[in-house]
Image: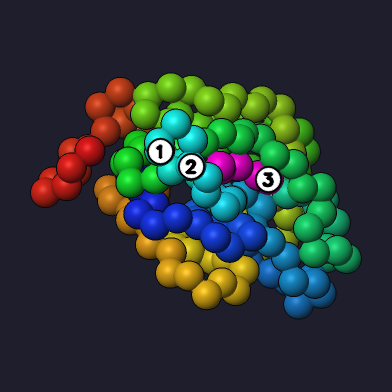
Amino acid sequence: YSFMIETPITAEFAIVGQWHDYPEPEDVHMSPPLSFVAYPSKVQNGQTVIHFAMATMFDPNLASPIANPNYRTRWSGSLVMGKWTNIVLNFRASIKDTGFLRLWLDGELVCNAENISFGFNNRTGFAYWQYGIYRKKDANTMIAHYANMRVGRENMAHLIDQPNPLLGRSA
């Protein structure tokens, strides 16, 4: 998919994309097992940049007794505010060290984690993609744009080098 944040971020953090889990009745409130998190923007070299992180969580227990078990940052970097970024994410969640996570930004592989565990041991299965802004309370408006969202099991490797065009939008 393609993604852009149009406004500066002033909130402590904002989840802007997540593979969310179905909680079990016994679970405490949990954050998503896979999330893209944006942090407050800064001006660098005349451009507003936003620091991002892709994080995972993992709990092999049937009920998670804590809110954010085994939180781990898998990638961090910065994106320029107002610039579209093409994102391709390929992963397999696993609670037995057989998972993987690959992230491409604008055709560049920035995360390639193999033999990892992330996700939760739930009876309901693993999760669903959810995008939008989920953040700490903040008085300022935050605007994020999403385009060409595709989620599926088919091979989407061609989108790494040849993303779908952003019709009617400037790059």
Between 77 and 22, the residue placed more toward the observer is 77
Between 84 and 116, the residue placed more toward the observer is 84
Residue drawn at x 64%, y 60% is: 12
Residue 94 seen anywhere in this rendered image of the structure: no
Q: CA separation, marks 2 and 3? A: 28 Å
Task: List x then y, in percent, for residue 94.
Answer: 69, 42
Which residue is identified by label 3?
A: 56
Q: Quadrant of residue 157?
A: top left
Task: List x then y, in percent, for residue 113.
Answer: 64, 27
Which residue is identified by label 2?
A: 43
Packing grade of label 2 (10 A; few <14, some 14-19, many >=20) is few
Query: What secondary structure do most residues of the magenta stretch adopt?
Result: strand
- Amino acid at the residue labelled 2: Val
Residue drawn at x 80%, y 64% is: 67
Decide which of tag 2 and tag 3 comes sooner along the chain: 2
Left or right, residue 73 beside residue 142: right
**Magenta stretch encompasses residue 82:** no
Q: Please provide the residue range marked out in magenta.
A: 51-56
Which residue is identified by label 1?
A: 47
Left or right, residue 68 beside residue 80: right
Between 66 and 78, the residue placed more toward the observer is 78
Task: List x then y, in percent, for residue 143.
Answer: 38, 62
Left or right, residue 12 beside residue 50: right
